[in-house]
Amino acid sequence: MVIDTRTCIGCGDCVVACKNENKVPVGLNRDWVVEATRGEYPNLETEFRSERCNHCSHATCVTSCPTGASHHWKDSNIVLVAAEKCTGCKACIAACPYDARLIMHPDGYVDKCTFCHHRVDQGLDPACVSSCPTHCMHFGNLDDRDSVVSRLLRERRHKVLMPETGNQPHVYYLT
Amino acid sequence: MTAAPAPRPTLVRFVFSSVGHLFRGPPLYWLWVLLLLALIALGGWHYWLQLRDGLVVTNMTNQVSWGFYIANFTFLVGVAAAAVMLVVPAYIFHRRDIKDVVLMGDTMAIAAVTMAILFVVVDLGRPDRFWHLIPGIGRFNFPESMLAWDVIVLNGYLLLNLGISFYIVYHHYRGEDPKASRYFPWVLLAIFWAISIHTVTAFLYAANSGRPYWHNALLAPRFIASAFASGPAMMALGLQIIRAISDYPIRQSVINHLALVATIALQVTLFFLLAELFTEFYNEGEHAASARYLFLGLDGHSGLTPWIWTAVVLLSIAVVILMIHPLRHNPLTMNIAFVLIIVGVWIEKGMGLIVPAFVPTPIGEIYEYTPSLTEIMVSVGIWAIGLLLFTLLAKAALPVQCEFLRRQRASEQQSWDGVERRHNAA
């Protein structure tokens, strides 16, 4: 997933779309918008970032899970939780450098962003990407050199969050 | 203990006579057992509420997802590991005085590791899915997951200690010397295993690269050092209580040995703490935010600051007491120091270690945490289970041990005198 922080206006539509699409319980969110302000008045700079699970290829939540409930979906980098295997030990929450996991799901498992893999399976974009009014979010296959996301990462300056943890995250922010 | 001719010692008789000992005791014993049972019932009730309503009755949140339970767990794994401080001198250096009481160290390890396992179980949001963690039935994420390692090492340690203790007590019951060739390899394994339980527990935290407060190489050494301070302190207190209420011969040299171990371990613990503080604060970066929250408060949030400074002060007083020889040999001041160590390490390695790693969260939010009534009551219940287990195991094993030692002394009176002189001189 590639998100353009230069065109994001911080409207929060992605958050609402996710809650609708995934029936996320009241009080919980699988994604959120961070408004980061840098500098001192009057030289201020604001960056909006729509954040969620980074679907890391070296996902510390997957390695720390004692039962294998956290897993990569079909050889992709999409990290999912098999609810029926989750013991609620919370090792993955401690392991996640992005605070992307929620224990408080009423059905008793650790919940998180799924990259809407049920939509991806049908060739659709995740709900947050589809709902973005400024088209600042893009979803695609980075192994495919001709995909929009590959082209954006080739052409634009970008960053990932907390690369120093070694998690190899896959949500990229264009800056 | 009975005057009648001893019946042929079989396994069944051993079990019956051990269980029999549990039902004979002075009123104080019964009062103590009933008190513990009442506390267990109270904890059980609160755990039932937690099972019914879910972890939402705790004060743990999405942000601070490990709290009071895991804090107690960490402390108790250390106590369990510290049994080696009796096992090594008893079996490797053949200290006779310590060999007499080493079984009590194993008993404490059994109680502590049982409590540790229970603290993990109550921390699970869905304990009904625990079977996924049982190798064979469930699919266990081994060797990747540190928690899977922890399940193996903790249960293995419990089995090792149960096995060794049972083997030795049973042979003592039969009036035989246990065969060293049969139990010594297991004792050696248990020594390494003891270090491993605490190392694996430290790695469980240190593995989380997103939590800078935990993600450092000093965590495991710090764990071991503080465990070797708090464990011997607890054992020394327990042994003195046993000595006061039974005729089990526990020499002062054993208590002095434990006091010395606790002193050195506490010095190392405080040195490690200093090294940690220096690294965090000399050139304070973003990674020091958790340490700042813990020791100084962050953005007006300082819930844990009074706690950690209490721990630092208690441990500092304890180390001063123990480093002054007359004070370390005075029973009153020595025992005060032991209590200070236990409370200090319990804070430093419990709430002081677990909670700050979650504050601030990786995305910079601050959510403070204090345990809920449920968490405190369930924890009290688990501590009561541990104390009851220790009491019952000791109650069952002590008469056998006393009898064995009495017989052994009678047969080795001459050589024994020499040993006694040597150790009393220490």
Image: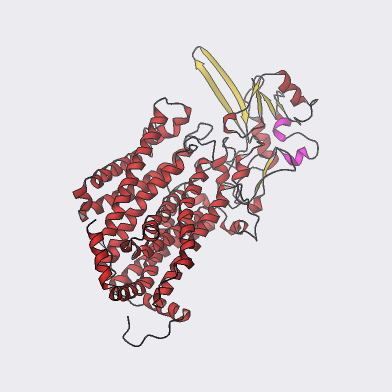
Nearest the viewer among B136 and A95 is B136
Residue A167 image position (x, y, % from top left): 61, 35
Residue A25 image position (x, y, % from top left): 62, 44
Quarter occupied by the N terminus of chain B: bottom left
Res. A101 image quadrant: top right
Residue B394 image position (x, y, % from top left): 37, 68
Nearest the viewer among B224 and B75 is B224
Residue A69 image position (x, y, % from top left): 65, 49
Instruction: Name the residue at the top extreme.
Output: A42
Q: How is the image coloured?
A: secondary structure
A150 left or right of B112 in image = right
Could you tell me how many numbered marks the image carries? 0
B104 left or right of B119 in image = left
Is the residue A117 above or below the residue B183 in the image?
Answer: above
Is the residue B179 above or below the residue A80 in the image?
Answer: below
Specify whether residue B46 is in view.
Answer: no
Instruction: Name the residue at the bottom extreme.
Output: B4
> Who's the residue at 50% across and 33% down the image?
B365
Specify whether residue B398 is in view.
Answer: yes
Is the residue B106 above or below the residue B401 in the image?
Answer: above
Secondary structure of the magenta portion, mostly? loop
Quarter occupied by the C terminus of chain B: bottom left
Q: Which residues are magenta?
A: A104-130
Is the residue B211 above or below the residue B329 in the image?
Answer: above
Residue A107 belongs to the span the image colors magenta: yes
Nearest the viewer among B134 and A96 is B134
Residue B5 belongs to the span the image colors magenta: no
Nearest the viewer among B335 and B102 is B102
